[in-house]
Structure formats: C-alpha cells, structure tokens
Image (spheres, rainbow, N blue to C red):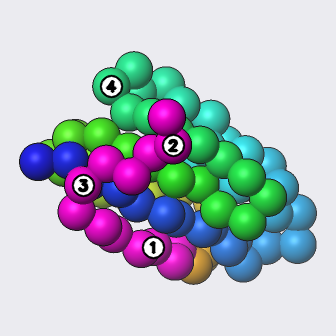
Amino acid sequence: MKLSVEISKYPLHQDYIPFIKGFIDRLNTYDDLKVITNTLSTQIFGDYDLVMSVLNTEIKRSYEEFGKAIFVCKFLNGDLSPE
C-alpha cells in the first residue's frame, strides 16, 4: 500500500531553521521515498510501512536532539506525488 504525507515541523526554538533543515535533509537520505519540499511543508510519498517507520525514527530523533517541536501531519492513502 502506498502513502502520501504532508508534514510541517515547528521547532519551539528561536533559531528554528537548522532544526527544520536537518529533519528534511535526513528524510532525503531514504532512497525509497520521494520527498518534495516547499516553503510551507514537506511531502513524503512511498510504501506505507516504510513511510511510517521513517517518520517514527526521524520524529523521535528530532525530539531527542532538539527538544520541543510541533509536527502537523496529513496522511492520505495512495501515492499522490506529482509526475
């Protein structure tokens, strides 16, 4: 099953850009995911189990490394990536 996710990260830190950039850079290291970033959010497309596993790992890592942050996510069944 394929999954599409739109995710936004809001670090509760004055110098927030490195926290967001690090999260996006780590998402881009997963070869089997398609990651599209714009000024408002990041979209992730791929196999359901892989996407959820990556989000589990990377959100936890963000909390451990950078402290408090808000993640806003939208999940939709299927691959809605632009061709």
Q: Position of residue 76 (x, y in %)?
A: 30, 67
Q: CA distance from mark 4 to mark 1?
A: 20 Å
In front: mark 1 or mark 3? 3
- Vertical comparison of 25 with 64: above or below: above
What residue appears at the point 52 percent right and 65 percent down from the top-left corner? 7
Residue 29 visible at all: yes
Disc 4 or 2, which lies upstream in sequence?
4
Q: Amino acid at mark 1?
A: Cys
Q: CA distance from mark 1 to mark 3?
A: 15 Å
* Residue that badge 1 annotates: 73
Q: CA distance from mark 4 to mark 2?
A: 16 Å
Q: Position of residue 73 (x, y in %)?
A: 45, 73
Q: Amino acid at mark 3?
A: Gly
Disc 3 or 4, which lies upstream in sequence?
4
Q: Amino acid at mark 2?
A: Pro
Marks 1 and 3 in Cβ contact (< 8 Å): no
**Residue 59 vs residue 43: left or right?**
left
Disc 4 or 1, which lies upstream in sequence?
4
Q: For residue 23: magenta?
A: no
Q: Which residues are magenta?
A: 71-83
* Residue that badge 4 annotates: 32
* Residue that badge 3 annotates: 78
What residue occupies the far top of the structure in this picture? Answer: 31
- Vertical comparison of 63 with 14: above or below: above
**Residue 8 vs residue 45: left or right?**
right
Q: CA distance from mark 2 to mark 3?
A: 12 Å
Secondary structure found at label 1:
strand
- Number of callouts: 4
